[in-house]
Every structure is written in structure tokens, then in C-alpha cells.
Amino acid sequence: MKYYITTPIFYPNASPHIGTAYTTVAADAFARYHRMNGDDVYFLTGTDENAQKIVRTAESKGMDPKSYVDGIVERFKSLWEELDISNDDFIRTTEERHHQVVKALFTKLHDQGDIYKSEYEGWYCTPCETFWPESKLIDGKCPNPDCGRDVELLKEESYFFRLSKYQDALLKHIQENPDFIQPASRRNEMIRFVEGGLEDLCVSRTTFQWGIQVPFDPKHVVYVWLDALINYISALGYPDGKLYQKYWPADVHLMGKDIVRFHAVIWPIILIALGIPLPKKVYGHGWFLSKEGGKISKSRGNVQDSFELIRRYGSDAIRYFLLREMQVGADGTYSEDNLVDRLNSDLANDLGNFVSRSLAMIVKYREGLIPKVGEDTALEQELKALSQEVKAKVEERMEALDPAGALENIWRLVARMNKYVDETAPWALAKQEDSQARLDHVLHTFAEAIRIFAILCAPFMPKLPGKMLGFLGVDQALLRWEDATDWGIISEGTRVEKGQPLFPRVDVSQWTSVEESKSVEQDMNQGVNEQNIAPVEAVDVKSEFEPIKEEITIDDFAKIDLRVAKILQAEKVEKTDKLMKLEIEVSGEKRTIVSGIAQHYTPEDLVGKSVVIVANLKPVKLRGIVSQGMILAASQDGVLEVISVNKDLPGGARVK
């Protein structure tokens, strides 16, 4: 099947930043996933260069617009290369192939009476490229919540597109095609907007000449939204190009939520007027917000250099963080300390440590040669069933344009494999002569899990699969989506290499700025406190456990009041992956504890359990919830288990 996915074309008025990168990384993950599934994919991105603010920015730098945007466009292309973006085309609205299509369609709309000349007077916001009626202004400024800057009163002769003429036709299409605008919150917003009535759209300007001239009236240039939106078909060679005939209509237009209105209202109406099929889906994802709140954007001055982040952490880590943090339909939060936390916990501890330990044990116990497959026990049968479930869930989430949900399911299998390592204890099997066949099967299972993780992670972290399969000594021809639930593919005797860690842990003490290091270290320590558990450190086969801390006296220990507590209720804390809110009973008193165990337990697993808590810990507020105590848990290599009491002791029983 064909699959045509697009990003919006980005304004090259400044270098791209981490917020800009999300859309393109997400589109790339979807494109890679569909290619792995055998689909015929076409992936388009590009830049929107015919805008007044480009002229003003260039003038402020003493440059002509074309020279200025050429330099910025190269920055976009370089960043996409650094992030392993696999786009099939990069469209620039200054290209002749685009100009020809825009001129032809503008003329056609005019000739059929859908574009007419009139005079426009209104308040214009240059950064937003939008006219606003005075009634919409807030304190005389742009009402866009991401802008709020000064507007200017403009009066000029303009051409207008009869947007209002097609209002009912668009509304009918939206209502008859529930998946056309997604997620549902954006769909409902657009329905309300259209039902509120549409005004005809200004589609030309005369106050500047940078852009595409109207063919039959050269003093006018085509206004940015009519010009820009046409890129999705001009890049395909509309109307007769083979690419257009093959790939249109688009399967997904992917963009940030702030420009959904243009893609879900203006663009479909243009297509309806021209008799061109509409795209199948318009999807508006959330914004990345700063830790302090507010969108990550150039206008807010809170962006961070994407190239520096890639240099510091690697492109796969940046891609993983972006895709994992943006929950479907919601905004994500970006901060570098959150990024480091994700890298250390998910990539270094969970996935990276499993791969390192597994390969090290194959090297140690079987001289680096993958042993033969043995008989499955209930443990392996459970793993195989879970891998099938996870693959199906990943497919479901990717079709729903939810990469965060897909990655969350993959990490369910990662966590289960880490637990499998401890359950099978290869270091113990190696000491028993009658357990060598069992050890062979366990080690082979490790290798197969690494191969399966390489396949499942390939759409999200494209550099990772080559490294993982290279460690296994197998060809990348095995990187097929249909093999993601097959076990026993790797041949006996294949030589593995331990290699370097896939994701080395980040040591904040090595950061260049002392002040920055202290700040981030404090934030990370707070994150550990939020989890109520000690961080898991990377270990190798020879050193399975963290060193024991320095000795304390009995008086020191006596200060800690450990009690049995019964869990009455449990629920995940909204907008977090790790935190669980627990209502407990201890000594006849009900308390609330927030604990970082949500990735290891469901609420149903916990209700009714008798656990051990630190009862006299000073309360602390976490995500707005007062936490009154700490649950004790043991953790190692990404596996965590709450310490529980099996006998029927009352809540409040002292632990001595």
C-alpha cells in the first residue's frame, strides 16, 4: 500500500530548534515503520519562504531575502541529516516547480469565480502572517496566545478566496469522516470554528514583492497560506506528475496544533473548490513546553541549540526523548535534565544494561558463541506471548499516530527481559553441570531478545539496530518487521561481541558549566526522591550489585520508623510515566504516598498488598500531591519489586 506523509513546511526565519524537530522526527518514525511493513512510502518536508517576515528579518541583517533563507535552509537540511530523517523530498516555496503550480491554481480559482478582487482593511500580525478583526485583539495586540505582539493597521487592494462558499461542504466532510481531523480534541475545535461561520480569505498582498506574482496582476503577490499549502501537491508534480498520480491524496498531514486550522479548514476548502481529493488525515500534535511553562519557540526566546544536544547525547537519544515525552493529544515538557533522566533510566539502565549484560554472559560462559536452542519453560512461553502482544500494540499505536504509546509498550518487554535475567540467574546455572543445556537456552533467548528489540526500536532510533545486530554478528537483512515475534532465528555458533555500551550513562558532574551541573544534579536528585527509590546504576556480570554504603550505628537506625501499611487504593499520577498515588492505612490512620513504581505495577497489582514504609519521613509535595512517607522497594538492572509482608499483620506493625 502507498503511504504519503508530510510535515508542515517550516519558516526559515531562524535556525531550527528542538520544538521544530519533534514534528519531523515523528513523521520520520511513521515513515520508517510503514517502510518496514512493506508499504510504498513518500515522505515530504520543506520550508515556507515566501513570507513578509522573511523580508523583514533579512533586511534587519542587511541581506536580500534569497541569500538569507538559503543559509537557514541549509541549517534545516543539516539538522534533518543529523537526526537521520529519511525524507524523500524537500520542497522550497522559492522553487520554480512550486511557483508554476501556485500560479496555475490561482488562475483557475479566479477564472471559476472563487477568487475576486476587493479592498482589505484590518490589523495584521507579521509573525503570525494573519489579519485580525479589531474585536479579536487583546489589549490592542495579537490574540494568538503564543504571540501577543504588536499588530499594524493595513489597508490595501487584495484578492479574496470565497472560503464561506464551501463552509457547508467542509462541515459535511468532517462529520462524515471522523478520522479526518485527529486527535478528537482538534476535530471538535475545528467543528466549532466552522460552525461559527467562515469569512472570505485574503490571498494576495501589494505592500511587498517577495513571493509569487499573481500571473494576471503582477503588482500582487500570492498571500502565504494559499501559496504554502499548495506545496503538498506541487512537490508531487500536480497535475500530471507520476508522483502525484501515485501518492495523492496524502495519508497524513502531521503538524503542531497551532496550524491545524489552516490545514483542516483552508486547505480542504481549496481542494474542494478545485475538485481535488482531500487528504485522509490531518493530525495536530501538542507543543513542547518549557519546564517553566509556555511553548518552546523562537519568539519566546527559550529554544536550545539542537546541534549541541545531538553532539552531547547522540541523535538516537534525542529522538527517543522527543517521541516518548509527547503523549497523544497532550503537550510535552522539555528540559535537559528530563532528557538526561530518560537517557539514564530508559536507555542506559533498562535497554542498554540488558544488552551489555546479555552479551557479556554469552562471552563469559560460551566464549562469545551463541549456543543452541533448547526447550521452552513457562518463562520463555510467557516471553513469546508478550512479544506478540507488544508487537500488536506497537502496530496499533503507530496507526493511531502515537509513538509514545508504541515506545511504552516496547519498554514493557524490555522490563520483562530484565526480570527474566534475574529469574533465570545464568551465573548460578553456570556453576551446575546438569544445567548447561538450560544455560544454553537462556543465553540464546538473550540474543533473540536483542534482535527483537533492534527490530521494534528501528523506526524510532535508526542508528541503534545496526549497532545491536553488529554486536550479535548477524546481517541487517534480519531487520524485518515480520520477524519481531519469531524466536530461534539466530544460528547456533554465531559469534557475538560485547562492544561499547549502547547508551553510556550521563554524569552531570562532567558538564562544562559548574552552575548548570549543580542545578541539573539538584533536579535529578529531586526526580529520585519523586520515585522514592534509589537510582539503578549500570553493572557488569562481575559486579552484580551496588557497593554497600558506609556503616551506621544502631542509634542511627533507630531514627527510622519502619511500619507495615496496607494499600487501600492506587492510581497513576496524571501526565507522568513513573508516579503512582497510593492511599494507605497505617496505625489506624489513612495517608497518601506518591511512589515511582508505576512502570512496574498496575493499580490492580497493588490494592490489598501489605507493604513496608518509612513512616516518619518528612512530607513532601510531588506534582501537587502531599506524599506522607516512602515505600521500600528493591531494584536492580531495571527490575523493581516492592517489599511486601505476606503474613496478615495489621497496618502499623513495627518493622525491626
Image (cartoon, rainbow, N blue to C red):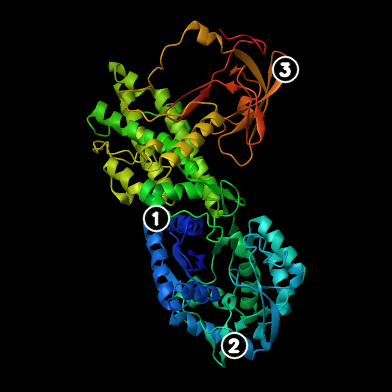
Cβ–Cβ below 8 Å for labels 2 and 1?
no
Q: Secondary structure at mark 3?
A: strand
Q: Secondary structure at mark 1?
A: helix
Q: Position of residue 90 (x, y in %)?
A: 43, 70
Q: Residues within 10 Å of mark 2 (few under 14, many from 20)?
A: some
List the residue tagged with mark 3: 589
Q: Position of residue 131 (x, y in %)?
A: 67, 74
Per the model, the C-alpha gap separating discs 2 and 1 is 43 Å
List the residue tagged with mark 2: 108
List the residue tagged with mark 1: 307
Per the model, the C-alpha gap separating discs 3 and 2 is 76 Å
Quadrant in the picture for the C terminus: top right
Q: From this viewpoint, is residue 386 visible?
A: no
Per the model, the C-alpha gap separating discs 1 and 3 is 53 Å
Q: Amino acid at mark 3?
A: Glu
Q: Residues within 10 Å of mark 1 (few under 14, many from 20)?
A: some
Q: Amino acid at mark 1?
A: Phe
Q: From this viewpoint, is residue 227 visible?
A: yes
- Which of the two discs, 1 and 3, sits closer to the camera? 1
Q: In the figure, 69 relative to 653: above or below? A: below
Near-viewer residue (43 or 369): 43
Q: Residues within 10 Å of mark 3 (few under 14, many from 20)?
A: few
Q: Secondary structure at mark 2?
A: helix
Residue visible at 40% across and 76% down in the picture: 67
Q: Position of residue 232 (x, y in %)?
A: 52, 72
Which quadrant of the figure has residue 202? bottom right
Q: In the figure, 155 relative to 631: above or below? A: below
Near-viewer residue (187 or 32): 187
Nearest to N terminus: mark 2 or mark 1 = 2
Residue visible at 59% across and 79% down in the picture: 223
Nearest to N terminus: mark 1 or mark 3 = 1
Q: Amino acid at mark 2?
A: Lys
